[in-house]
Image (tube, coloured by chain):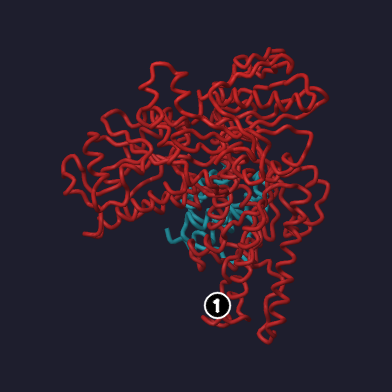
Amino acid sequence: MTELQYPFDAAYILKKKKALKKALLQEPVARTPKKIAVLGGSTTSDLVKMLELFLLNAGIEPTFYESEYAQYFQDACFPGEDLKAFQPDIVWIHTTNRNVETYPGITDTPADVDAKFEAEMMRFRTMWTSIQTQFCCPIIQNNFEMPFYRLLGNRDAYDIHGKTHFLRRLNQAFAQAANEMDTLYLNDLCYLAGDYGLSRWTDPEFWTMYKYAMSYEAIPTVAFSVAGIIKSLFGKNKKALALDLDNTLWGGVVGDDGVEGIEIGQETGVAQAYYEFQRYVKELGSLGILLTVCSKNDYENAIAGLSHPEGALRPDDFVLIKANWDPKDRNIAETAAQLNIFPDAFVFADDNPAERAIVQAQLPGIAVPAMDGVENYIRVIDRNAYFEVTSFGEDDLKRGEMYKSNARRSAAQATFADYGAYLESLEMRAVIDDFPSVYLARITQLTNKSNQFNLTTKRYTLAEMEQTAADDRYIRLYGKLVDKFGDNGVVSVVIGQKNGDVLDVILWLMSCRVLKRDMEQAMLDRLVERCRDADIRTIRGYYYPTAKNGMVRELYRTFGFEKIREDDEGNTVWELPVAGYVPQNRVIDVYDNDTFPS
Amino acid sequence: MASAAIYARLEKVFEDVFDEKIHLTPTTTADDVEDWDSLEHITLIAAVEREFGMKFKMGEISTMKNVGEMADIVEERATR
């Protein structure tokens, strides 16, 4: 819904929230239900209503627990029966500088100020620990916005008695805590308020009248930011950026103006603006966002433009370049298919409103930012939080490289007559073993974003995954695949729960970039081995259909399982006896965690 | 009493906020509109202020007794 994209009209969505919610609920999309507890230090009513709109728009159907006015600390440390029964998937602690209990006094000694700082930190640490112990779920914690007046003027920033200094010190300590605690995520209120404008943000009337800690029209900004974190945690981030070329990555039309005629580089202000945008796009690529081109151009001209010596991007930065005269929605659909992701995982960046409108209409769920004026390109993509980073692993850094290796594999495949001979030639080696702690973050990340090759689409928070990893009622396997073209990283996860002599497979998923490599067979072989060791006689598999996982409907059949149940919704249950199982993988050499040759 | 034009625009704002058509008279109060509670009152006030380019004074927001009083203040201060 474009009304809910940045730049949104805050007054409009506040006013029309009822109608907007109704419209969202009428959209024929499947949403993931999530329970969100909002523990506020000030009024949260409209924050929650705005958060609901943004989450619905991001494919999440939230239910909320809202603490009574300013009861955040009590709820966090001594949750009542309501909150306990609610069992939140996420807790958001909405505190602001209004909730700091003890600011330094002007006559305080340095030791007094330190004591007040420690007391404040202790209060928050106690809450975080309590929530982690009770609910074992991610915590979103606001840091502090700057104060709206400065008793000491500019000195407020560097004198230990200044509120500004004190709040910055707390923010620094919050940042450190978030780095140390896997389940703690900061909502950067300090940045949001600065970006919004502290004078506009602060509304003493709204505080005294209604106890809102920010101005009314700033509320959607806060909710949007929190929605960004939540959607990222639950695997709803965008994965790829499809870029137009002419007047998007450079000024002018390369086909008409020639390479020497396009504006990119340091010569003019406009050229610099395009250069800055190219550099930003390159930075996105370094985060593991897949960069692709979708341009109406002759291919040679596109490559020539991208090879402009003054540009920041090179043709090599893109995993796929579509430069032709076909409709753009078709090009994006094809690009998506080739990368094994869905079109709704794309952000389409194009300066031409007509192209944007067509793509938006043809590809539901795709994000199409309003790219108006090169000087605004970075902001509109950045502020929409399409790629909000909540976890960050080695695999993210290498993802672009992995997709490019895939392209080389496809080229190699074309030269083999026989697919088996091709697989042999890949010299594949895998580690398939129990979860090592170093991979838990990646395993969780993969679990939350795999949609297609995913039998049950069960999602885990990092905390839940840690619990599962430590629980001997489960048999766990992760698979990491290496071949002669490169390291694919962690690509598959299986979790089975032991129930007597039966293993219920509650999670089985694989990254689509290693489809048709016999990796799933290798996983099954290892699973059967582990089941034998644990005296399991039967493996029971489950398939729950979603809009996206049709490709694995018959997976268990191809494995040799027998279907024992199917209900009206297409949910199926399958069984495989462990006895008599014959290993199915012949092309991958499989190792344990500690035997893998590096 | 405020003009019919003011009432017409107020009705549009009420419709946006409560997502239903509401006929306003000077004596309409929060009791006459199902969803008009203290929380939605904030939304309503903010939307009216924006529509007419004006501000209510802090005291007025909690003391206005009916739509008539609201419309009179709006008429007096509207800048658009």
Point out the image quarter for the C terminus of chain B.
Answer: bottom left
Q: As displayed, is residue A237 above or below residue A475? A: below
Q: Colour of chain B?
A: cyan
The residue that disc 1 covers is: A157
Give the left or right position of residue A253, taking residue A5 as reference.
left
The answer, for residue B33, to whether it is visible in the render is yes
Which amino acid lies under the numbered mark 1 shown in the image of this protein?
Answer: Ala
Give the left or right position of residue B4, taking residue A209 as reference.
left
Tell me which corner region of the image, top left, top right, bottom left or bottom right, holds residue A164. Answer: bottom right
Nearer to us in this view, A454 or B19: A454
Q: Position of residue B79 (x, y in %)?
A: 43, 61
Q: Secondary structure at mark 1?
A: helix
Q: Colour of chain A?
A: red
Q: Position of residue A76 (x, y in %)?
A: 76, 55
The answer, for residue A362, to whether it is visible in the render is no
Residue at 18% over, 46% down: A259
Q: Chain of mark 1?
A: A
Give the left or right position of residue A151, taking residue A293 as reference.
right
Q: Position of residue A395 (x, y in %)?
A: 52, 43
Nearer to us in this view, B20 or A151: A151
Query: Are there few (<14), some (14-19), or many (20+) residues within 10 Å of tag 1?
Result: some
Q: Position of residue B48 (x, y in %)?
A: 52, 55
